[in-house]
Each structure stands twice: as C-alpha cells, then as structure tokens.
Amino acid sequence: MEIVTKKTSLNMNRITDQKTENFVIESDTIIPDIKPDILNTIATSGTVCIYKRELNNQKLRFDGTVQTYIMYLADEENGRVRGLQTNLDFSEGMDFEQTGKNASAEIDVRVKNMECKILNGRKIHVKAVLEVSATIYQNENVEVIEQLNEEANIQKMTMPTKISSLVGEGNTKIFAKDTFVIDNTDDLAEILKVEVKLVNRDYKVSYHKVLLKSDLIIRILYLTEDKRMKSIENRIPVMGFVDMPDVKEEDFCDVRYEMRNVLIKPNPVEEHSIYAECEIEAELRMYHNAEVDLIQDIYSTEKRLTFQSKTIRVAERTEPIKENFVIQEKQRMDELVNKTIYDARVTPRLNETEKVNGKIQYIGEVEVEFIFEGDNSSNVDTKRIVLPFDYTIENSQIDTTSKMRTNIEILTDQFVVEPDDQISIKIELEFIVEVSNQTELNLLDAIEMSEEELDRHGMVIYFVKPKDTLWEIAKRFCSTVDEIKRVNQIEQERNLPVRTKTIYSKLC
C-alpha cells in the first residue's frame, strides 16, 4: 500500500562548477596615415565588451572585443603626445564537465594586464591578458515531501533546511547616454584614453517588477588643438526594469552586468563636447529563501516500510556581503613635484585569500599608474606605485566549505598634491562577496507500507555503543525516541550512556 504524501515543488538553481582562467589576446595594429609615426608608448588601457555568450556540449564560448586606447609619443620634432584607438577582437572557450540540459553560464571578464610593443614606426603589437571567471548553474525541479498521513505509528526524522528556490530569471538592455561638455577654451583634437566602470549597484522589487539601479562612471582624457591634456568625468544614472510576475519584496536578486558596446564620439569642435553611449546587458535571477523541514528517514513501529531515496546538493544563497575599505596615506614622489597630474589608473589585485569559519581575509595590492606632465611641457611621463592592503571581513555566512566569489570595485579615488609636495592618496574600495553554502540532502519518495506485522517485544535491554543515536536504536527495535527518553529518563541525547550502561526500552 502506497502512503499518501503531500509534496511541494522547488526550482533549484545549483552552482555546479566555477573556474577562473587567463587568456592572452594579441594583434598587430597599423598606425593610420593621418597620425604621425610612433616613437614610444606612454600608456595602454582597455574596456572589455562581450557580444555573445553560449554554453553548448560542455563548452562555454564567448565573443567580444577589448576597446583599446594607446597613448604614444609621436616621432616628430616637438615630440607631442598622440592617441590611438583600436579593437582586440576575441573568441574564446572554457571546458566544463558538469553541464546538463538546463544549464546556464555567466562570466566576468576583466583586463588583468595590457602592453604595447613597437614593431616599427607605423606598426605596433598589442597584447592583453584577460582574467575570465565563469560560473555554471543547473536548474532542477525537485519534489519534496511536505506531509504524509499518520498511519501505523510512522516515525519521521526531519531536518530544518534553508533552501534557495529560483523564482524567475530575466534580462534587459540598458542604454546609458550623456554629452560631456568641455571648457569653451578647449578645441578638442583627439581622445587619448577612456575609462568606464559601473558602481553602486542596487535593485528594488515593486509591483511584480525588479528595478535595477547603478551609476556608470566615464572618465575621458583628451588632447586639445593647442596640445594641452585635459580630463573630464561624468556619472550617469543607469536604470532598467525586468518583469517578474511571482516576485516578492523579501526575495533577493543576483544581478550581472555585461558591457556590450561603448561609443565615445567627439562632437563638432565648435560644440565643445563629447558624446558617450554605453550598451549594457543586465541579467538577473530572483531567489526565495525558505526553511523546509525535510524528512530524512522514516519507519513504522507496527508494519514494514519501503521507500526510495536520492541525494542532491542544493545551495542556500543570500544577499551579497558588501563592505567598504579605504586606503589612505601620503607619499612624496620627487618625479611629480611641481608637475600636473593628468590621470591616475587604479587597479586592485588579490594575491591571497584565506577562508575560515565566520571570516575571510584578503591580502592584496592596489597599483596606481600616474600620467603626469614631463620635464618638457609638451611631453608626458608615467609612474607606477603599489599600495599593499590586508583586509578581513567577518560574517556568519562564511564557512570553510562555502563557494565564494569576490569582486572589488573602486568607488572613488582622489590624489591631491599638498603644500609640502606630498601626494595625499585616498582610494575607497568596495568588497562584494557572494556566498553560496552547499548542503547535501536526502530526499524520500515512493513510500509503501506492507501488510506484514513487525515482531513486538515487551522489553529490550541494549548496550549502547559509541556513535549510537536514539533514532538508530529506536528504529532498530521498533520503538520511539520519546519512549526511550521517557523510560530511561534521558533529557538530552548528548547524555546518552555508553558501553557498560544499558537502555531499557519498553515497547507498546
């Protein structure tokens, strides 16, 4: 006879694999005829744009480009600074073992390093090292027994478990546009460098929709017709909506942003402005956390039970941990004394991560590359410094077995030359730590009860062995945990007597 059960269906979105790899993208570039020969490179930077991402047959493929800006010293009498923009196109792949029918993938691609080598006055070789972090998700609908009818004194062992159930998925394209107005005295000659980043990422759930909010910061370094270097920075609010019919305010959102395209275009000289447009793809998953009393084992004190069981791994997800850390110090750099700082590129790196229960320690460094006025006023120079940091996040969500991913965003960076010629440095970092705690669950199904009556005993004397539990003893002798506790006056299981002690279990 099959036992009638009440089941609930949960949509599990499990992390099945995570991997980080480095890819080298390189290409030769010809200097356009309208630009002078190259004598020496000053700085090289790039923004990653992803056009396409596809997971198929255990292979994750992704196509995109690195929009690259190269500042160089022109091979001409005055040795002026010039700029060159080129694209490094790529099509790469990563292999994964655990990908199924309902698997999906997300990637985070960052420029780890860039360098430029001069081949001749009209040709250069550009190389970028990309750090790609990929996560594979697997959707699986799981039916969990919530209740079963109370026949033949069925005993249940339940385990309260927090489970993250997928509410829904969605994506939207966002176009962020702005016009950068430069000084009226500046007649724009060319763009030297562009830096793009998303900060202050947030969301709000309302009326079956998810509102995505963030700030897009664009910093442009440009050259004027009279050979002056200037910079301008704008903060553009980014907003997008995704329909999510079953979402509730207590649900939480996992949002990924991918830069699809960046367009920076100088307007006519007389307008004294630069047009900027970014196409951003936002992809989100909404989760609902619920505590479920999962039945892990059952038996009857009267009749024999049979059932099927399977083990699955599920994840409990929570809101990302966000903490800010400020690096603040003063340094004297003789090369920069009485010089104009045109730009500073800030790059954080993690060198070591140590995870223990309740906390995670980060050891890393922040590299700052200054672009500043050279000895010749028409020239520029660069200087790199490294600022080490050691930061610890304490949070009860962190466990040694947790799957974690950490992103470090640069919220603000300030470099001020003090009257004593020291440079006051203030860099605010935001640590964003995503934690997923994996749990292995035993799920029961197809519970049947035979008509066969179990042997009944009036009393059992049992000598307790190490690692015995009351549940195992009660199940073995068709008693109940409550009955054993009552007869033996046991208040807590950790006081279970061992070896020479005995348990007298009087059965009904």
Image: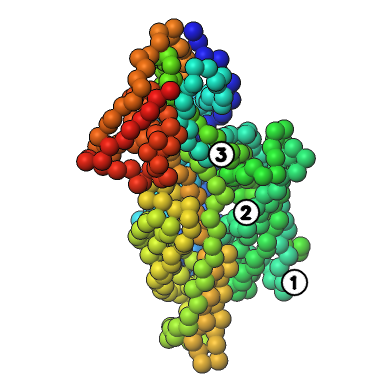
Q: Is residue 463 above or below residue 83?
A: above
> Which of 239 and 432 lies nearest the eye of the viewer?
432
Question: In front of the other: label 3 or label 1?
Answer: 3
- Earlier sequence position, callout 3 versus callout 2: 2
Cα–Cα span, label 3 and label 1:
62 Å
Question: In front of the other: label 2 or label 1?
Answer: 2
Q: Are marks 2 and 1 in contact (CB under 8 Å)?
A: no
Dot 2 corresponds to which residue? 201
Please provide percent x and percent y for residue 119: 35, 56
Cα–Cα span, label 2 and label 1:
34 Å
User: Residue, x 75% and y 43% (percent of image)?
Assistant: 206
Q: Is residue 374 above or below residue 94?
A: below
Dot 3 corresponds to which residue? 291
Q: Is residue 150 above or below residue 45?
A: above
Q: Residue furthest left?
A: 500
Check disc 3 and report its element: helix, strand or loop. strand
- Earlier sequence position, callout 2 versus callout 1: 1
